[in-house]
Amino acid sequence: TTGRKTGKQHTTPLIYGRDQSQFVVIASQGGRPSHPGWYHNIQSNPNVELQVIADIFNATAKTVIGPELKRLWQMMVEIYPPYDDYKEKASQFREIPMVIFRPD
């Protein structure tokens, strides 16, 4: 991501899932009260560079809303079950965003 305050490039390793050609991540930050910095950065600039194994490519980030949220959340919980615990922990502070990255 590009830092919203610094303009510098930031690298953040994240757990991801695949939904057809899209990559799905959850901005859980372990259930902490605030969104992670990378999520704030993509809200300012949704254009990112992704690396998946050895492949590096540009993508556009979008927060998931609507009916796809439940299906994709379940998919991500199957990949990493603690997401449900994080969701419960964060529920008194915020709704944890889910983000899809569409390769350009």
Image (cartoon, rainbow, N blue to C red):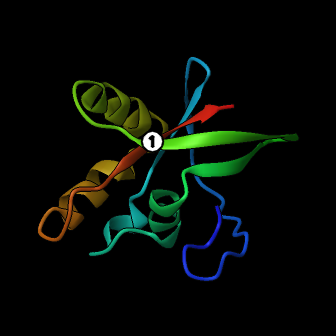
Left or right: 47, with 87 as reference point: right
Viewer-closest of 59 and 82: 59
Picture quadrant where residue 27 is located: bottom left
Q: Position of residue 3 (x, y in %)?
A: 61, 73
Name the kind of residue labelled 1 in the image.
Lys
Viewer-closest of 87 and 5: 5
The residue under the point 37% across, 52% down is: 82
Quarter placement of the C terminus: top right
Left or right: 34, with 26 as reference point: left
Left or right: 34, with 15 as reference point: left
Viewer-closest of 18 and 58: 58
Q: Position of residue 98 (x, y in %)?
A: 38, 45
Residue most toward the right?
54
The residue under the point 67% across, 75% down is: 7
Q: Position of residue 16 (x, y in %)?
A: 57, 42
Quarter placement of the N terminus: bottom right
Picture quadrant where residue 29 is located: bottom left
Which residue matches tag 1?
Answer: 62
Is the residue 41 above or below the residue 69 in the image? below
Q: Position of residue 67 (x, y in %)?
A: 22, 24
Picture quadrant where residue 11 is located: bottom right
Left or right: 9, with 43 as reference point: right
Which secondary structure lies at badge 1? Answer: strand
The residue under the point 19% across, 58% down is: 88
Residue most toward the left?
92
Residue most toward the top?
20
Is the residue 16 above or below the residue 27 in the image? above
